[in-house]
Image (spheres, coloured by chain):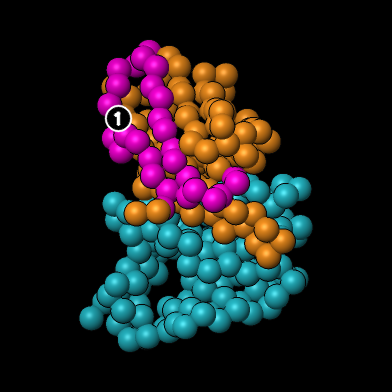
Chain colours: A orange, B cyan
C-alpha cells in the first residue's frame, strides 16, 4: 500500500499525559499537512510542511502542540498535557504541489480519546 | 468551517441524480474541492476544479462553479447505494493555496 499511513490508529490517554502521532506520506510528496476533525464537522487545518520546513500554523495549534518533519519525509505531531477537548480524529495528508494543482491525499487518521 | 457552508443532509432515490450545493466566501481561492468520507474511512479526493473553470466532468461526477455567486455544486448521476457517504466541499487558501478550508459536510443517503 503506497498511500498515506498513520500510527497509531487509536490512542486512549489520560488527561495530562503527552501523546505523539506519526504520519508517513506518499513517498514522492513534498508537502505534508495535519488536520483535526471532530464529530459532525469537517477537518480543520492545523499546520503544513514543505519538505522539512513548517510553513504555516493555525491559531488552533496551541503551544501544547508541536509538529516536526525532520528529514522531509515522515512527520510527528505531539500533544503535551492533553485535555479532554483534544479528543478528535487527527488526519494527515500529503501532496505533490505543482503548477497544475495541489491534490491532498489523506491518511486514515489517528483517533485520540482523552479520559 | 465557517467560510464554507453546505446543507447537512440530502436523500435521493437510487438511480436519480444527486446535487450537493456549497457556498464559499474567499473569492481568491485557487482550487475548490469535493471530498468523500465513508463511515470509518478516510477522506477520498473525488475531484477539484480550478477557479478559472466553470465546469468539470469526470464520469458520473459534474462540478459546476459560479464564481460570481461563490457557489459550487457536485452532481452525481445515476446515484448508487455505494455513493452513500458524507461529501465535503472545500476551498484552498493561503499564498500557495496550501491550506484547505472544509465545510461541515453533506450526508447523502440513498433510498430504494
Q: Position of residue A84 (x, y in %)?
A: 37, 23
Q: Nearer the viewer, residue B111 or B41?
A: B41
Image side of residue B50 versus residue A86, left or right: right
Q: Is residue A61 magenta?
A: no
Which image quarter holds the N terminus of chain A? bottom left
**Is B46 rendered above or below residue B94?**
below
Q: Is residue A13 magenta?
A: yes
Residue marked by disc 1: A11
Residue in the image at 56% along x and 50% along y: A29
Image side of residue A86 versus residue A99, left or right: left
Give me the chain letter of mark 1. A
Q: Is residue A80 visible?
A: yes
Q: Residues within 10 Å of mark 1 (few under 14, many from 20)?
A: some
Q: Position of residue A96 (x, y in %)?
A: 60, 54
Residue B76 sits in quarter: bottom left
Which image quarter holds the C terminus of chain A? top left
Residue in the image at 48% along x and 62% along y: B45
Q: Position of residue B110 (x, y in %)?
A: 30, 74
Q: Nearer the viewer, residue A113 or A102?
A: A102
Q: In the rendered structure, which segment of residues is drawn in magenta?
A: A3-31
Image side of residue B20 versus residue A14, left or right: right
Q: Position of residue A24 (x, y in %)?
A: 44, 41
Residue in the image at 59% along x and 45% along y: A31
Amino acid at each position: 500500500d503506497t498511500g498515506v499511513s498513520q500510527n497509531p490508529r487509536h490512542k486512549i490517554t489520560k488527561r495530562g499525559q503527552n501523546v505523539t502521532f506519526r504520519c508517513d506520506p506518499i513517498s514522492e510528496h513534498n508537502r505534508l499537512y495535519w488536520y483535526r476533525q471532530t464529530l459532525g464537522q469537517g477537518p480543520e487545518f492545523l499546520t503544513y510542511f514543505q519538505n522539512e520546513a513548517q510553513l504555516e500554523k493555525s491559531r488552533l495549534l496551541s503551544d501544547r502542540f508541536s509538529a516536526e518533519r525532520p528529514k522531509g519525509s515522515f512527520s510527528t505531531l505531539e500533544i503535551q498535557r492533553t485535555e479532554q477537548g483534544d479528543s478528535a480524529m487527527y488526519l494527515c495528508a500529503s501532496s505533490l504541489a505543482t503548477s497544475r494543482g495541489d491534490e491532498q491525499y489523506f491518511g486514515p487518521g489517528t483517533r485520540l480519546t482523552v479520559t | 468551517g465557517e467560510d464554507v457552508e453546505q446543507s447537512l443532509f440530502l436523500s435521493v432515490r437510487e438511480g436519480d441524480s444527486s446535487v450537493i450545493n456549497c457556498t464559499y466566501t474567499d473569492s481568491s481561492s485557487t482550487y475548490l474541492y469535493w471530498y468523500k468520507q465513508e463511515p470509518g474511512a478516510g477522506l477520498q479526493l473525488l475531484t477539484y476544479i480550478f477557479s478559472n473553470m466553470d465546469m468539470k466532468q469526470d464520469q458520473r461526477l459534474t462540478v459546476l462553479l459560479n464564481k460570481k455567486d461563490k457557489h459550487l455544486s457536485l452532481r452525481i448521476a445515476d446515484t448508487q447505494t455505494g455513493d452513500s457517504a458524507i461529501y465535503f466541499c472545500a476551498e484552498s487558501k493561503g499564498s500557495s493555496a496550501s491550506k484547505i478550508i472544509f465545510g461541515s459536510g453533506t450526508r447523502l443517503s440513498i433510498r430504494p
